[in-house]
Image (cartoon, rainbow, N blue to C red):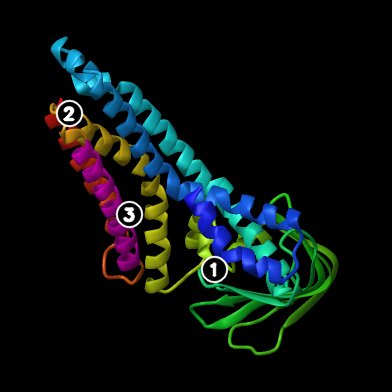
Amino acid sequence: MLFLITDVFDDLSDFLEAEASGIEILRYFLMKQPVNLVNVLPMSVLLAVSYVLGTLGRHHEITAVRASGISMVRFCLPIWCMALMLSGLLFWLNESIAPRFAVTAQETWDRLVEGESSRADEKAKLAFRNEKEHRYWFFESFNPRGEQLGVSIKQFNPEAQSLNWEIRAAKAEFKDNAWTFANGYRFTYAEDEKLPVEEEPFDTLTLSDLSESPRNIFSSLRPMEELTLREILRVLDRQGMSPATRNIFWTTVWYRISFPTACLTAALLGVGFGTTRERKSTLKGFATAIGLMILFYIINQSAAVLGKYGILPPFIAGCGPSILFIVGGCVLVYKRR
């Protein structure tokens, strides 16, 4: 609700000035909620665990559990299971739902407020370079989900720094992991020759050894926040890039993998500070857990920024804070056992 209220205060006036309909405005705010849920869920776990343990503590049930010889680690087994399940849910939200909803929300904003489509350039002229395989593509009309028009491909020889072959086609389509070109020419070049030594016209030409696909090409052009983990790994595998850019992508990969464990971190902090022996210390422990969770967010984001700038190694920047707080939470729970 706090995130929703913030979004309403920030964006509602712009929609009203643009005279957007109530249904479109409602749709926009609903599209933003899965993105907000990614950030809200870990803190919600901490609040829930603290509330449950605080209630049990007020009724002396934690004291009874300790007196019966049951350790807090075993007693909180349902909390650990639920935290792991919510971590999996958070990973799924962050990889499948949140990016798509973020794109839809941004498209709605651009269309209603800015008066333009953020995807207007999907079907337009596009140049793409695959540095890993030394291949250049050009599209007169690029469509990530359909037929391509005016396609040109140039394959270079990196050792001789010369052109090997070139394909020019009026149309092209990617289907069943193969490119099919129509109404074009294939040119073959000799080493150190600027003009083709062979020209072959074709009605249709199918090539299955080209690793690029419209989806891969389009993924390399989208903002990294809109890409899933699988798409980021595909970009890293299929495109040559500078070390600085590679640091950014790998930091994001490790961050995406480790961030869902924030639910487990929240559960550990909630149990560690919520199972004190003195009732007066419950509120103090709850406040400490909230403060540490906020500190976790700050350190996590700061480390990610340092990793993207190459100051920290990508793995340390992406996973370091999560590992540090999980280990600290485990030590705290062990002491409270």
Label 2 or label 3, whichever comes before in sequence order = 2
Q: Choose between 139 and 111: the one closer to the eye.
A: 111
Q: Main secondary structure of the magenta part?
A: helix
Mark 1 touches mark 2? (CB < 8 Å): no
Residue carrying label 3: 297
**With respect to residue 237, does 124 lie above or below?**
below
Q: Position of residue 90 (x, y in %)?
A: 46, 42
How crowded pointer 1 is (Cα within 10 Å; few <14, some 14-19, many 20+) is rated as some
> Label 1 to label 3, Cα distance in Å?
39 Å
**With respect to residue 97, does 317 lie above or below?**
below
How crowded pointer 3 is (Cα within 10 Å; few <14, some 14-19, many 20+) is rated as some
Residue carrying label 1: 133
What amino acid type is highlighted by mark number 1?
Glu
Q: Position of residue 135 (x, y in %)?
A: 60, 72
User: Is 296 covered by the magenta stretch?
Assistant: yes
Label 1 or label 2, whichever comes before in sequence order = 1
Q: Position of residue 306 (x, y in %)?
A: 30, 67
Residue carrying label 2: 279
Q: Does the image show residue 276? A: yes
Q: Does the image show residue 209? A: no
Instruction: Find the magenta span and give its range.
Output: 283-307
Disc 1 on helix, strand or loop?
Answer: loop
Mark 2 touches mark 3? (CB < 8 Å): no
